[in-house]
Amino acid sequence: MILLTSLERLWQNRQDFFAGGNLSIYYSIRQLKSEDVKRPDFFVVLNTERKERKSWTVWEEEGKYPNFILEILSEFTAKNDRGLKKQLYQDVFRTLNYFWFDPYTLEFAGFKLNYRIYEPIIPNEQGWLWSDELQLYLGIVGEQLRFFTSEGQLVPTPEEAEAEERRRVEIERQRANAAEAKVE
């Protein structure tokens, strides 16, 4: 949810993407919702209409698959996320950026599609991984996976942004009071 809400806040003026968490993606060639479905933990589709959806149905969305997928590993899903899902996202979805993160062990990896094969994304000096698709870094802060801008700034959640704005307003109020007191 942190990634979803912070991305939606960052891109609040954009109308050309869809971001979802724990939503079904239906991708059956026969256009049947009873077969070929996956539920990534978080995904982003670019160059699409920004509107509410209860699921992502590829054949109803001009054949578009996610540009970015993140799976949260657990002891029950890790093998599948590293194996079968990675293969599916590479070969069928052709998702350009695939990441996984384990919130308990802090295992974190990212891949970019290069000539139909996933190649590992090399971390920067901070250990962050760059998403070409989102034009953002992903990195671990306080055992949470977070977005960072290309300049290295943490992308705040709406709550963090509101708290920062309240702090800024309070500092300005204190400065104005100090200046007024000085004039008196």
Image (cartoon, rainbow, N blue to C red):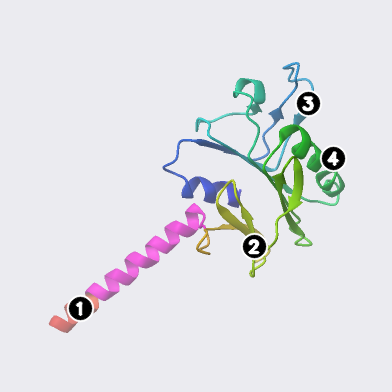
The span shown in magenta is: 155-176
* Closer mark to the observer between disc 2 and disc 1: 2
On the image, numbered disc 2 is attached to which residue? 128
Q: Which badge, 2 or 3, is on the more N-terminal residue? A: 3
Q: In the picture shown, does residue 175 fall above or below 40?
A: below
Question: Would you name the residue on which mark 3 appears?
Answer: 36
Q: Is residue 117 above or below residue 165?
A: above
Distance CA(mark 2)–CA(mark 4): 25 Å
Q: Nearer the viewer, residue 146 or 128?
A: 128
Disc nearer the start of the sequence (1/4): 4
Q: Residue 11, percent across and down?
A: 47, 46
Quadrant, the C terminus:
bottom left
The residue that disc 1 covers is 179
Q: Residue at x 52, y 59 (%)?
A: 150
| Disc 3/disc 4 C-alpha distance (Å) | 13 Å
Label 4 sits on residue? 84
